[in-house]
Amino acid sequence: MRKINTYEKSRAAFERAVKVIPSGIYGHQGPAEGCYIPIEAFPLYSSKAQGTYLWDLDGNRFIDYMCAYGPNILGYHDPDVDAAAARQRAISDCTTLPNTVMIDFADLLVDTVACADWAFFAKNGGDTTTLAAMTARAYTHRKKIIFFKGYYHGVAPWTQKIDYAGVIEEDVMHNLYCEWNNFEQLAELFDRYKGEIAAIIAQPYMHGNFMDNQLPDEGFWQKVRKLCTDTDTVLIVDDVRAGFRLDLAGSDHYFGFEADLICFCKALANGYNVSALCGKDFLKNTVSSMSYTGSYWMSAVPFAAGIACIEKMKRLDLPRFLIEKGTKLTKGLIETSHKYGFDLRATGVPSLFYLRLADDPTLRLHQEWIAECVLRGVFFTNHHNHFINAALTDADIAETIEITDEAFAVLRDRHPV
Amino acid sequence: MKDTTVLARCNLYAVLGAIPHLLKLDPEAAALVAKKNVKVGFSVKNGPKATLIFKNGEAEMVKGTEGCSIKLWFPSPEKFNALIDGTGTPIPVSGFHHIGFLLKEFTKLTDILSAYLRPEPEKLADPVFFERSTTLMLYVIGRAIVQIGNHDKVGMFSASNITDGKIKLGIGQDLAVAIHCQENHLLFNPAPNHRGVTSSMTFADLKTARDLFDGNINAIAAVGMGQVRISGMVSQVDNINRILDRVAIYLA
C-alpha cells in the first residue's frame, strides 16, 4: 500500500496567501476552478520540480501529468534549455535594444511552423489570441468573431462571456457562437452575418474543460478553411494548449489544413515565458501597423530557451514520442479500470489526454478516483486535459498504473458492485 | 445593470416568496396569521402576478391572482419595487374588507421579514435570530437565482450553459435547497432529497454561509480553505455561481 499524502504545509501557505493575494491562488491554478475536488486531496504549492516530478511543500513527490498546465514539455529543468537560457542571461536579457536572438527565434519558427511567414513575440497565450483578433479586425474591417462553444482563448474581456465578472455587454457583443464540428451551423452564421465576420478562432480540436475532448470530424477543418478563404475571413488557430504536442509544424498541419494565424505559448520554451503569434505573409503589414507591445516582450533569455526547446523537440521527434507515451499510459489506465469493473474513458490526442470515469454521470466517482490517485502521488486534475512530457519514462508509466490500480481498488471497496 | 421587471420578480417570488418559510421559522410571525384565511394577490402591470395564501398559520405562494381575497395592483414594476423598498404604497383594487389584515398582520409580517433579511448587526449576535436570518437568506437567494436565471438577460446566458440536473445548495448537513435545471429553465426546490443531485455546493456552516452572503469572505478563497465544498458536475455550480453574483446586484 502506498503512503497517503497529507498537506499541512500547503494549507498553512494558502492561509497565509489569502491574506495578501486575492483568492490565494488565482486563475487556472486556483483551487476553485473545479480541478481540485475534493480540495483536501490536493497539494496547493510546490517546493521543487525535476523532469516529470513535482514536489509539494510537505515533501510529497508526484508524477506530474499537468506539466505546469502545458509548458513543461521536455521535463522540468531540461539541461539543454536551461543551459541555453543561462548562456543568454550572461550576455543580456531585458535591454534597451533587443538582442538578435529574437530574429534567430523568429527564423526558427518560420522554418518550423508550416503556415508561418513571420513571428511576433509576447508573453502569454492571451497576448497572442488578442493580437490575432485585432489583426483579423484590422485586416478585414469587420467586427464579428466566431467561437466554438467550450472554447478557451485567454482572459481578455473579448474572450470571456457576458456573465463573467468585469465583462460588459459591449466587450462580447460581436462574439458569435457555434457548436464544435457543426459545419452547417457555422455556414448559417456566415449567411446571417454576411460581410461582417472578421475571423473564426478555434483550438485545433475541442479540448475544453469538463467535457470529453472531441477531435475534428473527417473533412471538418478543410470545409472551414474553404469557407474562410471564400469569404475573406481570417482563420485563427489557438494552438496555445496543444501546440508542439501534436505536430511541430503546428496542429493545423497535423489536421491537414493551414491557419492564417496561429497562436503558441505553453510548450514553446519549456517554461520560459514567451508566446508567439505566427501568420501568413498577407497579414504581416497589418500586424506591423498595430500598436501592441509589452515591457518584457523582447527579453532575450526566453528566446534562447525557445530556440533550444524547439531544436531539441525536433531532434527527439517529440510529438510522435509524446503520443506514443500517452497512448501507452491511457491504454494502461483504461485496462486497469476494467479490471475493477469501471469504465474509464480517455479522449483527445494521447499527448494531452482527457480522462473521465463514465460510470457516474454526476462525475463524483471520477472526482473520488482522481483524489485517490493524487493522494498516492499521481498528479491528475478532475476535469482538465492532462499533458505528457519528454522526461516521462516507462517506469513512471508503470508506477502510475500501479498507483491508479490501488486507487481503483479503494473505489471498488467503497462502491461495491 | 438591473432590469426592473426582473427585480419585481425577485421581490415578489423571492422576497415575499420567503414568507411561507418565515412562518415555519418564526413562531411570532406564525402567530400573527394563525387564525387567518386570506389570499393576498399581487398584480404588477407588465410584471409578475402571484398570490400569497394564508391558512391555518401557514402560507404558500401560487402564480396568478385568480381567487384572491384582496388584490393589490401596481401600475408598473417600479411601483411594486418601491413597495418592497418601503418607499411606495400598494393600491388595493378588490377585497377592501380585508384591508385590516393588510394594514395590521401583513405589515407586521413584512416588518419581521425585513428584520431578518436586512438585520441590525447587533441582532445577529443572537444565535436563534442568526440561524433564522441566514436560513431565510438561503431561501431568498435560491428563489432569486431561478428568477434571474429565467428572466435576466445575463442570467439567462448563464442558465443556457447549465446542463439538465439538480444542483443542491446546502449549509452544513441539514439545510439545503435545490435548483432544478431542465432545458435551461430553472425551478426552485425548497426541500430537496439526495436523489438525482448532479452537483452540489455546500457551505461548511451557517457562519460561512452568512459571511459569503454578506460579502465578508471571498468565495474562491473559501473553496480553497475547504469552507465551501463543490462536487459533481461543477460546470453547473460554476454557472449557478455566475447567477448568484447577479442576485447580489438585484437584492443587495
Image: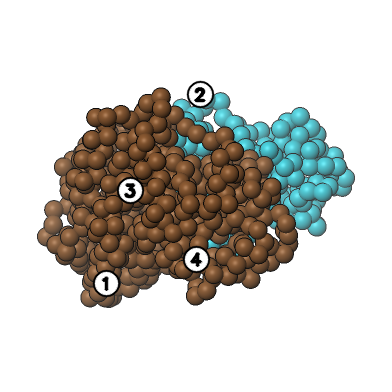
Dot label at residue B122: 2
In the picture of the structure, the residue carrying the numbered disc 3 is: A71
Q: Which element is circle 3 on?
A: loop
Q: Which element is circle 1 on?
A: helix
Horizontal side of residue A3 vs A411, given as left or right: left
Chain letter, disc 1 residue: A
Display coloring: by chain
Report the front residue among B176 and A9.
Answer: A9
Check disc 4 and give the amino acid type: Phe
Check disc 3 and give the amino acid type: Pro
Vertical position of residue A275 compared to residue A92: above or below: below
Q: Colour of chain A?
A: brown
Q: Position of residue A282 (x, y in %)?
A: 58, 52
Whether labels 3 and 1 belong to a single chain: the reply is: yes
In the picture of the structure, the residue carrying the numbered disc 4 is: A257
Q: Position of residue A414 (x, y in %)?
A: 25, 65
Q: Residue at x 27, y 29 (%)?
A: A91
Q: Colour of chain B?
A: cyan
Q: Residue at x 39, y 50 (%)?
A: A109
**Of the two numbered discs 3 and 4 in the rendering, the one whose residue sits closer to the viewer:** 4
**Of the two numbered discs 2 and 3 in the rendering, the one whose residue sits closer to the viewer:** 3
Q: Which element is circle 4 on?
A: loop
Image quarter in which the C terminus of chain B is found: top right
Asked whether residue B197 is in view, the answer is no
Check disc 1 and give the amino acid type: Lys
**Is the C-beta separation of discs 2 and 1 under 8 Å?**
no
Image quarter in which the N terminus of chain B is found: top right
Q: Residues within 10 Å of mark 4 (few under 14, many from 20)?
A: some
In the picture of the structure, the residue carrying the numbered disc 1 is: A331
